[in-house]
Image (tube, grey):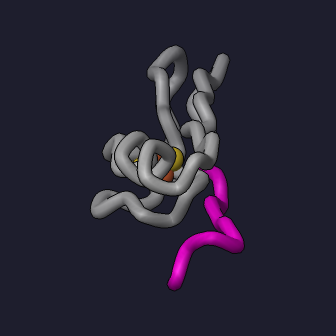
Amino acid sequence: MKLSKNMKYSFCTCGLSETLPICDHSHREYNLINNTNYKSLKITPDSDVNVDVKSSTWKS
Ligand code: FES
């Protein structure tokens, strides 16, 4: 995934987002129902960069 300098990205950590790997705030309802505390991982790169994005909570 290509990330652009000074752009703010919010990556999903819960695995429920419909827009993986980007958070769509689905974690909020899940946290309320399940008493969990998932939050997105926020990244603002200081240069243009390509990254591999993976999480054990994602199904693919
Ligand atoms: S939807 Fe998964 S962390 Fe926000």
Is 22 situated above or below 57?
Answer: above
**Residue 53 coordinates in the image, percent (x, y):** 62, 60
For residue 29: magenta?
A: no
Name the foreground residue: 14 vs 34.
34
Q: Position of residue 34 (x, y in %)?
A: 52, 56
Question: At x 32% / y 45%, what residue is drawn?
Answer: 24
Using the image as rendered, state which of residue 1 and residue 43 is in the foreground. Answer: 43
Q: Image height check: is 9 above or below 15?
A: above
Q: Does residue 12 appear in this view?
A: yes
Q: Position of residue 44 (x, y in %)?
A: 59, 22
Residue 22 located left or right of residue 52: left
Is the stretch drawn in magenta largely helix, strand or loop?
loop
Residue extending furthest toward the bottom: 60
What residue span does the magenta drawing correspond to? 50-60
| Residue at 51%, 84% in the rendered image | 60
- Vertical arrangement, residue 48 with respect to residue 19, above or below: above
